[in-house]
């Protein structure tokens, strides 16, 4: 277990302080500047430029829209999200399934809550229901611009049962054989831990930049203290801190070894 770096600096961002967009069908909270919400002092942390916490009502969603030169990772917490894009990919994203879209030279896609309940044994739609979809969408800058657009998804629900920090998406060489999906950036890795009460503490990666986000539940982080749902910690100067929970929590951790220019 890595000892925490004593020189680390913690920037705690509370859930209620995030930018907010409420469009009726969409309840979105933005950790960084997004759309018409702009703060020149809050545009990114490391390589992470978007960390949106979205809830979409049944039958609604994001109509077809473009992206370019961005690695986009979507992580569903509740419900199911239907993805369709201009290069022929269609997929249903649900809790425990990791999804990555590389926008590259340009891609069009839509994301909708079509309110299909999944049969978890077969992976097929079983019946209609009226459940909102709650998901976190994260964008990181790719290593290079102008790559071929791509899409990848993979079920990792079983791995998450360990309660430990599981690599979900990365381009870092040390993780590529263990992560669910690959992103086009060799300096970044996204990890998820579904923690249960009383389990062994989770040790954060030792990296110069970390973004620790409590997606569900409550947790406590060494050097920081209690964190609630939607809270985030931006770490500079080294990791290794321990995270614990008295009940249950799901945390998303971005490990980064480079940063974009401010």
Image: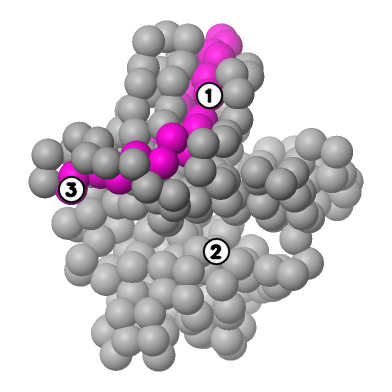
Residue at horizontal 35%, vertical 65%? 193
Q: Which mark is residue 110?
A: 1
- Up-down relation of residue 104 to residue 29 (above or below): above
The residue to which callout 2 is attached is 213
Residue 108 among those drawn in magenta:
yes
Range of residues picked out in magenta: 98-120
Q: CA distance from mark 2 to mark 1?
A: 25 Å
Badge 1 marks a residue whose secondary structure is: strand
Residue at horizontal 46%, vertical 16%? 85
Q: Is there any visible trace of residue 72 in the rendered image?
A: no
Badge 3 marks a residue whose secondary structure is: loop
Q: Nearer the viewer, residue 2 or 202?
A: 202
Alpha-carbon neighbours of circle 1 within 10 Å: few (<14), some, or many (≥20)? some
Q: Percent position (x, y) of residue 44?
A: 71, 47
Q: Percent position (x, y) of residue 237?
A: 61, 65
The residue to which callout 3 is attached is 120
Cβ atoms at labels 2 and 1 below 8 Å apart = no
- Up-down relation of residue 217 to residue 89 (above or below): below
Q: Percent position (x, y) of residue 62?
A: 60, 30
Alpha-carbon neighbours of circle 2 within 10 Å: few (<14), some, or many (≥20)? many
- Up-down relation of residue 225 to residue 71 (above or below): below
Mark toward the start of the polypeptide (3 vs 2): 3
| Left-right relation of 74 to 261 | left
| Left-right relation of 231 to 244 | right
Q: Nearer the viewer, residue 46 or 60?
A: 60
Q: CA distance from mark 3 to mark 2?
A: 27 Å
Alpha-carbon neighbours of circle 3 within 10 Å: few (<14), some, or many (≥20)? few
Residue at horizontal 50%, vertical 80%? 218
Q: Percent position (x, y) of residue 210?
A: 55, 60
């Amino acid at each position: 277990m890595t000892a925490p770096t004593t020189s680390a600096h913690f920037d705690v961002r509370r859930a209620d302080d995030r930018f907010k967009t409420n469009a009726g069908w969409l309840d979105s909270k933005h950790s960084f500047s997004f759309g018409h919400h702009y703060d020149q002092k809050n545009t990114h942390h490391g390589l992470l430029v978007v960390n949106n916490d979205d809830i979409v009502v049944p039958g609604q969603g994001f109509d077809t829209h473009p992206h370019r030169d961005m690695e986009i990772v979507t992580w569903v917490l509740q419900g199911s999200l239907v993805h369709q894009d201009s290069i022929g990919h269609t997929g249903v994203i649900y809790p425990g399934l990791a999804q990555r879209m590389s926008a590259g030279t340009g891609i069009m896609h839509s994301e909708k809550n079509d309110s299909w309940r999944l049969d978890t044994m077969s992976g097929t739609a079983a019946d209609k229901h009226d459940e909102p979809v709650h998901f976190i969408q994260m964008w990181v800058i790719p290593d290079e611009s102008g790559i071929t657009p791509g899409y990848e998804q993979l079920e990792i629900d079983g791995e998450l049962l360990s309660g430990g920090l599981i690599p979900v998406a990365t381009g870092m060489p040390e993780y590529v054989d263990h992560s669910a999906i690959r992103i086009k950036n060799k300096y970044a890795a996204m990890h998820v831990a579904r923690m249960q009460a009383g389990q062994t503490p989770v040790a954060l990666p030792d990296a110069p930049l970390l973004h620790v986000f409590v997606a569900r539940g409550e947790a406590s982080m060494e050097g920081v203290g209690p964190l609630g749902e939607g809270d985030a910690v931006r770490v500079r100067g080294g990791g290794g801190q321990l995270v614990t929970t008295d009940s249950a929590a799901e945390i998303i951790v971005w490990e980064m070894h480079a940063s974009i220019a401010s």
